Amino acid sequence: HVQLVESGGGSVQSGGSLRLSCTGSGPINTYWNLAWFRQVPGKEREGVAAIDSDALTSYADSVKGRFTIIKDIAKNTLYLQMNSLNPNDTAMYYCAAQRWSVARHVMLSPGEYNVWGQGTQVTVS
């Protein structure tokens, strides 16, 4: 499996923006589905945004209109552009990949992914 490494997390005030990056040790375009998830202590991991090899995207309702998932093949990097951040967005953010096609209705289900990064913390105050 390719290894995924996230970066770009940090602390930001409400209303601010951050861009998370996820770089693969191998070609990320060999994976059919790529996604971002987040998790806070004591809660289940939540799907945030996903993109497949046809550039079809899926977003959690809580981030629609504020977050954008971007796959840059040339840079071998998956991005999550996060705008209008609020304290509810505070979490550890993870990128994930799956080599096989994932049905659209489960693109944001963590159980559908088998390659994970180590996470990057986002704190909004």
Image (cartoon, rainbow, N blue to C red):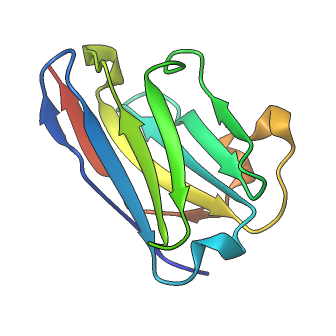
Residue 44 appears at what percent x and percent y?
A: 52, 31
- Asked which quadrant contains residue 6, the reply is bottom left
Q: Residue at 66% x, 47% y: name it.
A: 51
Q: Is residue 46 above or below residue 4?
A: above
The C terminus, quarter of image: top left
Q: Which x, y percent locates residue 93?
A: 38, 44
Q: Quadrant of residue 47?
A: top right
**Residue at 21% from the left image edge and 15% from the top image edge:** 15
- Pinpoint residue 120: horizontal percent, then vertical percent: 29, 51
Q: Quadrant of the N terminus?
A: bottom right
In the image, taking residue 97 as reference, residue 66 lies left or right, namely left
Q: Is residue 26 left or right of residue 9?
A: right
Question: Hey, which residue is sitting farthest front in the picture?
Answer: 74
- In this orientation, which residue lies closer to the viewer: 40 or 89? 89
6 above or below 125?
A: below
Q: State the count of labels.
A: 0
Between residue 65 and residue 2, name the one nearer to us: 65
Report the front residue among 5 and 92. 5
Query: Residue at horizontal 14%, vertical 29%?
Result: 12
In this rendering, the answer to whether 120 lies above or below 104 is below
Q: With 47 as the anchor, is 106 left or right in this view? A: right
Point 59% across, 72% down: residue:
28
